[in-house]
Structures are given as structure tokens and as C-alpha cells.
Amino acid sequence: MREFVTKRLYRDVEGTCTGRYGYIIAVVAILEIQMGKVIPGHGSAEFEVKYSAILYMPFRNEVVDAVVDNVNTLGVTANAGPFGIFISRSYIPTDMKFDPHSNPPSYHSEDQKIEKGAMVRVKITGTRVDATEIFATGTIKEDYLSVIE
Amino acid sequence: MANGAADLFDDQSSDNEYSEDDGAKRAAAAGRRRQYSDDEEDEDDIDEEEESAGETAKAKAKGSRRPRKRRARGSNFLDIEASVDTDEEEEEDDDGALNDFIVDNEAEVASAEKDALRHRRLAGRGPAFGGLSDDDDAGLDGEEIAARLRARYSGYGESSGGRRGAAAAMAAGDGEWVPQRLLIPGISDPHLWVCRCAAGKERDIVLAVARRVFQWRGSGGRFAGVFSAFARDGVAGHVYVEARSVADARDAVEGIAGVFASKLALVGLGDMVDVVRVRARTPRIRAGAWVRVKRGKYAGDVAQVVAVLDAADSVEVRLVPRVDYDAVGKAGGSAARDGGRPAPRLFSADDARRADPRGLASRQNEITWRGDRFVGGYLHRDVRVAALELRAKPTLDELATFAGDDGDVGALIAGDDQISGVAVGDAVDVVDGDVAGVDGVVVSIDGDVVRVAARGVAAPMAFAPSQLRKRFAAGDHVQVLAGRHAGATGLVLVAQPHLVTVHADVGGAELRVLPRDLRAASHASAPHTDTPAAVGLDVNDLVLLDGGQPAVVMRVARDALTVLDDRGETRVVPLRDVRPARGFDRAGVDCAGAPLRRGDHVREIAGTRRDGSVLQVTRFVAFVQPRAAPLFVARTRQLEAADKRGGTARTAPNRAAPVRPAVRAPFGDPLIGRPVVVTRGPYKGYIGVAKGAAAAANAVRVELHTNARVVNIARDSLAVRMPGGQTVSVADFSSQQPQRQQQSNAPPSASSAQSPSSKGWNTPANTGVASSNSWGSPAPAAASSNSWGSPAPAPSSNSWGSPAPVSSSNSWGSPAPSSAWNAPVSSASAAAGSWGSPAPVTPGALPQTPGGPSSFPQTPGSLAPHDAMQQPPAAAIAADGFFSWAVPRAVVVLGPSRQRGTVKEVAAARLQAIVRMEDGSSQVIDRASLPRLDPQPLRAEKRDRVVVIRGPRKGALGTMVGKDGSVAFFQEDAAEAWQHEPIRNLAVLDSH
């Protein structure tokens, strides 16, 4: 029974997102499993489990590394782990120009190029936390940001 | 003056006093003139110049004090209280102008009084005050002054000839304060006459009246009874004259161009106050504000106020010019004349030079071209405030247009007097006032007072909404409240003071929004406002796609709709390409011409014969929802009404939405193409040709022979001209026309039941013979055809003469089965419904005389057999329609598919018949199935074996030898001679 509850906990909560705490990356330890209660008239039981977990909650002004997912005229979308970041064109350094003809499309300057798959270091400017998802906007138009090799 | 009023004199008492003294006349006139032309400062100055020139040296001292004096002049003659309310009729003054006269504090009142005295003295009252210098006023004993004043004003009411109301006079005489509202005009006061005049000329007329009065009054005493003339801005085409008598008033306005002096009306005592009451002040307008032009070439365009001109009456605005440079070259060709107007674009001097170099002149940064002033590419114009819509909220797009290609929208928005739209909880910046620059959060809003808890300040501070601007920071999660993107949420990317760029949550587009249209969204992304719902669209709604294509909404997404269009294609269209089909013509006609409406049960007449209920219908297509199948679309003409509620039910008044006559018209109006004579109305006696149904119900378009004009004429004003020269009224004519349609495959029209105007759907088979007698029809048919021919039977009385529109008329039910030839599908069935209910018509109760209740004209040549006695009870007609003629071996066509069958047995008494169909099946026709099957005899052609189904020879077998029009030559078997028999009396005989 313990094993089942543990497995079920891992399966149910790891990788999910709560609006309050952010992403639950991994359950580290199960602290307590209380006595189960059979739900009347239902046949299933309810166990309250206390556990500790690694959470990921992006905050404004946090600097994260992200992988570019999509590049278009509006800007760049990137994924930092589970959540997406949108970097508006207005927050991309002005010397980086959008080149729709390159393959894949990219923003590039003399020495840098942002295309799909590139790693960028982004500062988060805002987040939108839904019940099941977090979305952020970010900027790479500051010192020490932009593409990382 | 803003309301266009020219006060001849604000103060009559002063006037009167002046007139006591002959020597003062000239000055008084000047004073009056001054008051009158208050807004024309230059003239004013000249007047005063004259005045002072004519005076003694004292006037010089006065000249130096003119600014003060000007103000005092008003207060001298005005009741100070007048500023509080503008009730008093003598003060037709409007906003602003009056307020300038008001002296606010007591010191000023005192000095104004002093000035007034001085002024009076200057005006010719020398002896009384002559010995006093300016400064002597102060030296006078206060009580003495008071006594003098009292003496002067004691006769205030009486001396003015009882001009003021008794109450006012009494009160004023006592020197007591009189509430303004008591100073209402009485019967002894001058009256107010309102005079119609040409719209737009009101001001000119008022000025003309004033000019005339001033000119003549001084010399001859003419116009002594005229006191004021004015016009109200909001009341176009009216000029008010305050005068003693109507003669005085007429005298004042008569002969002035644009005045219709004959239309002089007295304004009631109670209304006089209302006439001059100023209800709403003109909204304050200031430079930088956005306005919208109401009319003209620039109607709807946003404009920005550059400067406020004289007395806030008109403003200088700048707008993006709509210049068609190309049109200039053409001779007299302007874009406006071509129908369109050029797109707004900033003025291009190059283009202008190319188009018309001579019209171009520039001075500093201002370019004048063809009379228009352009500054920085914008057209500058002086516009009257009345022609502008104030407080326009320009959209961002409009501002972008305004800014031009490379303009800075932000700078423009900064000029907007922001309607900040703050709400409780908003983070705001204070942008105006003492503490501009502070930011805080809105705590409460109480009317126009917004309390803001400013950062670092303990107590909330109060601001006007216009002092605040919403404040956003990059990364804020916001929702758009208004505008094109209303309902969208997103993250703020860039927050400029006047413009916020938002990254939309859905779609990822970048929206540029004004701060006033944004609001912080709750962090857990509030459910989106459903934009389609916001515009009132829902599933199953009828919408119009671009190009006017009708479609039905199948699914509603956030900003896109899935629609089924009229070609049966399912498409996803963006919301902006769709508009709700409100007020759209929601009626079509089915294959039988019966109106189709939403909710009707219909079936396709071809193909897979799908059926369902009409979800939406337009003139041409119907969107049909089957019970258990997806929505489909069909042309209305490919549908037939499947529910046999029938035509009569549909014509019930509450459902009788008008079908467009243009739709009805095609159904064989017998009148079309006929020569007609107009029997009534302005065109009486004219001859023409009926061209078709007119838009108005029950009217016909008639092309007149005389001048080839097409005019609409009511049916009952027409008579048909027969080839023989005689005329037949339309009603009779229609009734005489047999229906031809039974041979065509299309089921006959049922719309006749619906629309009086299409009563004549029975297309003429014969253009020559038009006497109903020639049909030799038996009584029931003839009688009932009478009732169809009537313009519109009255609902209950069955009186066919009444022109009232059809409601659930019994007599419409009756015609259908009167002759099964003519029985239309649904009216037959409708008749089935209405058989039993109405009382059979009492013979003789029918109004038949032309002079009776019928408004329908009976042309003398009318041949219709109006024999009321022949009218059988409706039930009888209806019941035996088919059974009255059905004979064995007659070939009939049945049902909607018009299948052929042969009558095998007929039991007329039991109202039953058996028909053997071509495919070998048998069909029982009885009372129940009759409406559905609608059997019609198969019309005979030449050399057909026929059976006579009606008339005295009913049942006879023979051959149709030939025909002449609608008369067949019938050779009975075993007879040598041919007989004449109307074709409708013959049916094809089954030879088997």
C-alpha cells in the first residue's frame, strides 16, 4: 500500500505546475503518509501525504538560461525547462536584425546569432502564472545577457 | 455670443431712463449698440471712441479706465443675481459672455457701482452729478448715495411701463432682493414670438433685425415695441422676437431675406423661460483635445483642436487632409462628386505643386493651397464647435493615421485630454496638478473625485480623473478593456506613458493599447471575456461575411468563428471579417412561393430530400437543421414547407412579417404586361402598362404611356383595359384569370394566401377572353374566385371588398379548394384547417355594391358575377374540391413529386377515392391525405383522350380535337359535332 501511494504521488505531482508554488520538478522525500480514508460510496481511498519537493518558480528579474524554440518577426520564444519565455523584438539588442531568409530564421548581429536551438540567457521581465502553466516575458537587451555559447 | 443671441439691450430700465432725457438719446443709442455688439470688440471700441469724443474732458479720464469700465458697464445694468441663473428672459445671454460681467467680490461691486454712476453722468445726466469729480463719489455721504439710488430705482418696475411682472416690480420697488425664479414674465410683459426662417440664417436675421431696429428707433420711434431678437443654436430655423404685439414683431422681421414672417407664433407665457434657459453649458474645449467632425467631407474623422477661437464658439482644428490631387486637374471633377472621398493622407506639397502649382503659396511653415491652409501636412480649419463632436476618443489606429507614416503616436496621445478611465485598485500616475509625478493606487472613486493612496503619503489624496493616468510596468499581466482587442489579456512588454505594448496570451501577437483601455488582470489569468459574445454573436446566429455573404455561426472561438456559408462550405473566419446580420431580411420563399421563416419545417424537393427546421433564412438560402444530422444549406427555392400548417396559419397577423413584394412578384401576376388605366389619384385617367409589383404592398409599377415614366400605383386605383376597349377593375380581372400552373411541375403558389398583392397568381391563360362568364364555371368556382380577386378580404367578415390586409382570413382559405385546378398546396391544407371554424357566410351578407363598405372601385365595365347567393359556404367548397370533379379513369397528378395516377374509384359521399399510381401502387385519397397529395387533373392536350370532369357534360368521354385559348374543342365519343368546353373542365383519360 505504501509503495502504491508513493508511486502514485510521483506519478501525479512530478512535472506538474501549481499556480502557487510553480513547477514541481521532483519529489525529494516523503515525510508522512497519513492513514487513508475510504471515500463513502465510492470505493477509493484518500491519503494525505506530506512531501518535500524541488520546485521551480520563475520570478521577475530572475536570469535564466533558455533554449530558443521559435524565431519570428515578433521576437523569440524560448523554453527554460518547463515554461516558455517570450522575448519581444523590442527586448532584443538593436544590432540584432531579424533575417527571415536564413534557414532557420534568425536574429543575428555581427558575431551573434539567435536561431532555433540556440541557448540564450534571459532576464525575466514578467510572468503569467496560470493554474497549470507559467509563461514569462523576458529581455536579452541588457549586459551579460543574450546568446551563450 | 455663443447662442447667437443679439441682445438689443440687456437692460431695459436703463434704456428707459435714457429716453426720459432727450439729450441722452445719442449716447443711449451708442450704449445700446455697445451692448448689442459685445463680442465685436473693435466696433465696441469705436463706439466708445465716438462717445468719449463727444463728451467733455471728463471722458478722458474714463478712457484710461476703460477695461474696468467695460466690466462695470454690464454690472451696472444687470441684476447681479442674474449670473446665478439665466432664467430671466431679458438675459438671453449664454454662457461665458454673461459671466464676464459678473463682479465677484464686494470691493469690485462697490467700485463697479462707482463706475456706473460715472458712466451715467457721462451719458448725459450732467446736472445731477455734474459737480462731482470722480473722486467725489467717495466723498459723498453713503446715505445720500443710497437715497439717490433708491429714488432712481424706485420706479424700476412701473417706470418701465409695467414691463416686468407685478411681483418683480413690487419687489424691486422696495429694493428688496427678488429670487430670480420669481422674475418670470407675466401677461403685461412683452411677448415672445417665434418666427420660422431659413435654417442656418438665424444669426444673419437676428443681426438684420437689430440693425433695422437700431437704425429706425432713434429717429422715428418705429420699432418701439420691439425689445429683443435672438436665436437659439439648438433650434434651427427659428428666430425669436420679443415685442409688444404681433404687429411689432412682424414689423421687425418682415422683409428680411430668409424670414417666413407669415409663420409667426406666440410663445406661451410658460414657455418663454424655457426658450431662453441655457440647459447645458458647452463642454469646455481646449487646445490639444480630440474631436470628431460631424459632417461633410471629413465626417467621422478625428481632428485635434489647435486653438480655441472667439468665445469658445469656434475652434481651429487640424486634421489629416483628404485631398485628391488628381481630381484637381479634371474639369470640375471632385472626388466627392465621384461618390467616394479620398483617403486621408498628410498633405504633400510636391503632389500639390504637380497638380496645381499656381494655387500653392507658402508663408513660413504654412502652406496655402487652393484656399486651404496646411501646416506640417495637416489641414488647419476653423470650425464651429457645433459642427464637432467633442470628447472624441480616437482609437489607436486613427491616431496612427493622424501621425502619418513616421509620426510619433505617443506624442499625439500626450495631447489628448485623457479620459483616464481609472478604477479602484488601479496603479496610477498623477500627471497634472500640484503633485504631478506622484504615483499611487486608487482607493476609491466618488463621482469625479478619485482618491489615491500615493506612495509615501499617509492620507489618500483627491484628484480629478483627468489628473490621473493608469500606470503599467513591463511584465504586468493586463487585460484590454476596450477597442479592437477588447477582452484580450497579455503581458506588458513595453510600457510607455501613453502607449502600452502587450504580448497577447493567446496568439502571441503584440497589441498596442492605450493605457486607458487596460486594466491589471488578476494573476491567475481570468477567464477571457468572450469577444464574440461581446459583439452579440452566438452559435446559430446569422452573420454576414465580407461581401455580404450570409453564413451561420457553428462554433465560436475567441477571435474566430467557424461558419457555414451559403455555399455549404465550413470556414473559419476571423471575427473582424464578420458582422451580425441584424435587421437582415429574414424571409425567403420556398419552391411554392410560400414564405419561409425560421422554425419552419422544410424538405428539399430534390436530391436526398433532407428535411429539417429552418434555422436561419435569407432571401435566397436557408440554413436547415435536421433533427439528427449536421446543419445544411439549401437554396430556398429547393425547399418546400413540410409542415402542413399551411398558408393560412402563416398569414396570421402576428406572423405576417412582410415578404418583400419583389419576391412575390414573379408568381404570375396577371396584371403584368397588361395595359391599365388609372382610375384614381393624381394619375387618374392615365394609361400605361403594368410592369411589376412595387415595393409598397398592394401597389403596382405602371409605366405610363404618356411620358414613359414608371410610377407606383395602388392596385385598387387601377383598371385593366381589355382588348375590346372595356375596362375591368383589377380585382375582377384577377378573379377572372384562370390558373395555368397546374400543368407545370412546380406546385402552384400558395403565396396568394399570404399576400393580397399577389392574389392574381393565376396567370392568364388567355389574354383575349376575359369574361368570367366565358368560363362557364359552375357556381362554386366562380363565386369563390370572386373572393380571391378581392383586394384583401377582411379577417372575419369575409367581405372581399375590404382593402384591409389579410389576416387569418377565412375567405383565403375558401378559394383554394373551390376548384381543384387552382388549389395551391398549402392553401388547400390551410383551408382544411379553417373549414369548420368560421360560420358559413350568410348569403347576402357580402357587401357587393360598389358604394358599400368596400373601398374598392367597381369599374362600370366589370364583368365579374358578384352573385352573393352563389357563394357557397366555405366548408362546402373546401370539402369537395377534389371530389367535386374526380371521375374514374381521369389522370391526375399527385403529391409534391407530381406523380401521375389514374382515378380508380370515387366515393364522393364518403370523400374517398383510390388512385392507381403509374408505378402500380395505389393511393387512397381522403380528407386527411387530400391536402398532402393535392391531386390535380392532368391537363389535356390536343388529340388526347379526355373525360369531362366539370360542367353539364361531366363524365362524358371523348377526344380533344383542338383548342382556342382556354377553350377546348371537344368531340364526344360517338358524336359528330365538336363541343366547346373550357380546358379546365377536361382531364386526360387513362386509356387502359
Image (cartoon, helix red, strand yellow):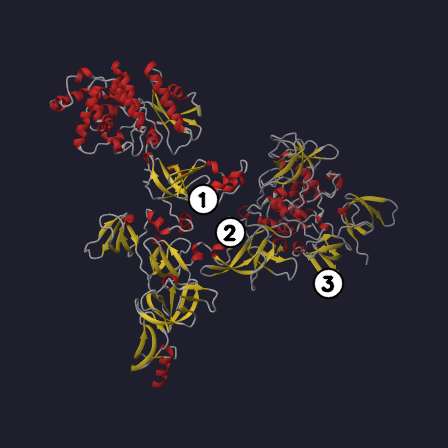
Residue toward you, B131 or B478: B131
First reached walking from the N terminus: tag 3 or tag 1:
1
Disc on the earlier residue, 1 or 2: 1
- Indicate whether B407 appears above or below B800: below
Label 3: which secondary element: loop
| Frontmost residue, B250 versus B659 | B250
Answer above or below: position of A19 versus B512: below
Name the spot of residue B801 as percent of width and height, x first: 62, 37
- The residue indicated by pointer 1 is B348
- Circle 2 — which element? loop
Residue B800 place in picture, x, y as percent: 62, 39
Residue A1 seen in render: no
- Badges 1 and 2: C-beta atoms under 8 Å apart? no
Asked if disc 3 and disc 1 are in contact, CB closer than 8 Å, the reply is: no
Residue tagged by mark 3? B921
> Circle 2 is placed at which residue position?
B581
Chain under numbered label 2: B
Image height check: is A1 above or below B748?
below
Name the element at disc 1: loop
Q: Residues within 10 Å of mark 2 (few under 14, many from 20)?
A: some
Q: Which three-letter amino acid code belongs to the residue tagged 2? A: Ala
Q: Quadrant of the N terminus of chain B?
A: top left
- Quick check: B764 left or right of B180? right
Is residue B23 rendered to the left or right of residue B323? left
Report the Cα–Cα distance between label 1 and label 2. 41 Å
Q: State left or right for residue A53 relative to residue B788.
A: left
Amino acid carrying mark 3 in the image: Ser
Q: Earlier in the sequence, mark 3 or mark 2?
A: 2
Chain ID of residue with mark 1: B
Asked if labels 2 and 3 touch by Cβ distance under 8 angstroms, the answer is no
**Residue B695, quarter of picture:** top right
